Image (cartoon, helix red, strand yellow):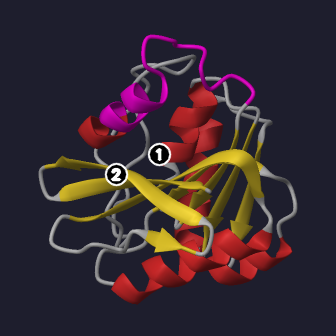
């Protein structure tokens, strides 16, 4: 795994050795960020992110590399949050992030800083969690008015078209993974 672009371009991230994680692939992250920054490498400068079910932190780190002002990593596994800390340290990132080692739904109830982007990536087998998380996001008030919520999921599973005020407006498939894009209406 590596950082695709931005300040930390081509820098390697520590692997999830001995952790039961499925990191978002380099190729899928590249596709995601190409969609988010079409022709404008500065499109994410100053953005605020929630990286939910953060795993290795690769998506949030990519956002920081591309100019995000704040990324809140939320991950229930202490071993995974330690890996996120190590990856941030290896890259020399000392500010612009918070790491929360707790259940995502509980974290959403306690976070207050509005987010412009949210990445939702639970283990593919936890299908019920997608709906619960997206529903909770629609109710918390943590989303900026123009916030974008992206859920990564297995291609044979569809998390749904709408959750409260969130509506899916785009699906992008790549290999076995799909990115579903939601925004508030």
* Badge count: 2
Q: Position of residue 130 (x, y in %)?
A: 44, 77
Residue name at image x 62 percent, y 26 percent: 44
The quarter of the picture where residue 165 lies is bottom right
Residue name at image x 73 percent, y 66 percent: 100
Magenta segment? 30-46
* Residue 103 vertical position relative to residue 100 in the rendered view, above or below: below
* Residue 122 vertical position relative to residue 105 in the rendered view, above or below: above
Q: Which mark is residue 68?
A: none
Would residue 103 be seen by someone viewing this image from the given angle? no
Is residue 43 rendered magenta in the image? yes
Left/right placement of residue 179 relative to residue 95 reads left
The quarter of the picture where residue 65 lies is top right
Question: Which structural element holds mark 2?
Answer: loop
Q: Position of residue 172 (x, y in %)?
A: 26, 46
User: Residue at label 2?
Assistant: 24
Q: Are marks 1 and 2 in contact (CB under 8 Å)?
A: yes
User: Marks 1 and 2, Cα distance to the nearest angstrom?
Assistant: 7 Å
Q: Position of residue 61 (x, y in %)?
A: 56, 39
Left/right placement of residue 158 relative to residue 6 reads left
Q: Earlier in the sequence, mark 1 or mark 2?
A: 2
Would residue 39 be seen by someone viewing this image from the given angle? yes
Q: Give neighbour class at mark 1: few <14, some 14-19, many 20+ (Cα, 10 Å).
A: many
* Residue 111 vertical position relative to residue 60 in the rendered view, above or below: below
The quarter of the picture where residue 116 lies is top right
Front in this rendered view, residue 169 or 142 = 169
Left/right placement of residue 51 relative to residue 5 reads right
Query: Where is the C terminus found, in terms of image quarters?
Result: bottom right
Question: Which structural element holds mark 1?
Answer: helix
User: Residue at label 1?
Assistant: 58
């Amino acid at each position: 795994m590596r950082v695709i672009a931005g300040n930390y371009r081509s820098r390697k991230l520590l692997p999830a050795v001995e952790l039961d994680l499925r990191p978002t692939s380099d190729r899928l992250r590249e596709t995601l960020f190409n969609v988010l920054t079409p022709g404008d490498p500065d499109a994410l400068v100053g953005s605020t992110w929630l990286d939910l079910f953060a795993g290795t932190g690769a998506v949030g780190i990519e956002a920081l590399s591309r100019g995000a002002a704040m990324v809140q990593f939320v991950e229930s596994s202490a071993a995974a949050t330690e890996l996120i800390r190590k990856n941030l340290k290896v890259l020399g990132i000392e500010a612009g992030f918070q790491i929360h080692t707790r259940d995502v739904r509980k974290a959403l109830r306690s976070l207050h800083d509005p987010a412009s982007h949210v990445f939702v990536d639970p283990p593919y087998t936890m299908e019920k969690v997608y709906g619960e998380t997206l529903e909770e996001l629609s109710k918390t008030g943590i989303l900026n008015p123009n916030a974008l919520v992206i859920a990564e999921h297995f291609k044979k599973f569809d998390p749904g078209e709408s959750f409260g005020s969130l509506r899916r407006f785009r699906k992008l498939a790549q290999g076995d993974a799909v990115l579903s894009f939601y925004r508030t209406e």
